[in-house]
Amino acid sequence: MLTLERQNAIMDILNKDKVVNINKLSGLFSISSASIRRDLEKMEQQGLVKRTYGGAVLVEGINAEIPLVVREIEQREAKQLIAKKASGFIEDQDTIFMDSSTTTKELTNFMDGISGLTVITNGIRAITDMALLENITVYGISGKLRKPSLSFIGNQAENCVTDYWASKFFFSCTGLWMSHGAMDYSDAEAELRKKMMSACQKIILLCDHTKFDRPAFYRICPFSRIDVLITDLKLSEQWESLLMQNGVDIVYASD
């Protein structure tokens, strides 16, 4: 198991149990206690945990953003399934907006066969990936660099968006909360997404099962603003009912 995969697995345990023990983790992953201590030290530097005597506790908070390098690994298989399903909504000659989320970035792996596609995004990782695809014209939204997400944000980015028009907007979020809708760690990212929503015909949310019942710092939009939600696992009856009442078309990646 790679170091980042192990740290991601430790985060899964922390999200469930709120606390971990070094000796138990050492036995679980069949590695030395020293290696686990190094993992926890690195995770503490990233602001994810607080080390304690013999272990660590989860650092919780709705404005505590998980580092990009961890988010890219987190739920990777689910994100790929969702992105593959979402690519079916893209048509030849489309012009689309994409946000800077790691889920949306996975869309770039399924764009090769789409002809005449134009993509407008503030995500640096997505731009880099699409540079290798000859069938895509890419427009980068400029602005202030936001290092945690490797994206461009701010007034300049928001003003840039208003000059474009797209058929669809693909985005993700930190969490979905029944009373507030789609939410994010960053107010600046959320405001830019709102500008993209105002300049497109259809809004498509890509969201794996871990995002439900998970609040964050800043509201992106109410559910009534979303046209399609693509997720990986079957939702509860309560969630399905709420989304359908708000006119959201629910699509399961496994169907």
Image (cartoon, rainbow, N blue to C red):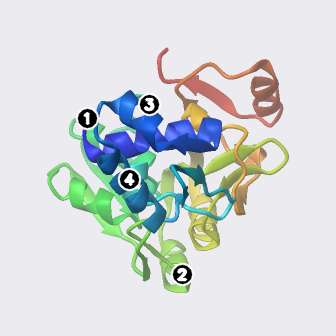
Residue ID for mark 2: 154
Q: Give me the residue at 82% from left, 31% from top.
A: 242
Q: Position of residue 177 (x, y in %)?
A: 76, 45
| Residue at the spot of label 4 | 37
2 or 1: mark nearer the eye: 1
Callouts 3 and 1 close, C-beta under 8 Å: no
Q: Locate residue 243, reporting x and y percent.
A: 76, 32
- What's the distance in space between the residues labelled 2 and 1, CA to CA? 39 Å
At label 4, counting other C-alpha atoms closer than 10 Å, the crowd grade (few under 14, some 14-19, many 20 or more) is some
Lower sequence index among marks 2 and 1: 1
Using the image as rendered, state which of residue 179 and residue 3 is in the foreground. 3
Q: Amino acid at mark 4?
A: Arg
Name the amino acid, label 1: Met
Query: Nearer the viewer's eye, disc 3 or disc 1?
Result: 1
Residue identified by numbered label 1: 1
Q: Position of residue 208 (x, y in %)?
A: 54, 35
Mark earlier in primary sequence (3, 2): 3
Q: Secondary structure at mark 3?
A: helix
Q: Residue at x 47, y 68 (%)?
A: 164
Q: Mark 4 against mark 2, which lies toward the viewer? A: 4
Side of 28 where 238 appears, left or right: right
Q: Earlier in the sequence, mark 3 or mark 4?
A: 4
Whole-angstrom CA distance, mark 4 to mark 1, is 16 Å
Q: Is residue 25 left or right of residue 212?
A: left
| Residue at 48 percent of width and 56 percent of height | 166
Image coords of residue 86 (percent x, y): 44, 34
- Quadrant containing the N terminus in the rendered view: top left
**Badge 1 element:** loop
Residue at disc 2, secondary structure: loop
Closer to the N terminus: mark 4 or mark 2? 4
119 w.r.t. 206: above or below? below
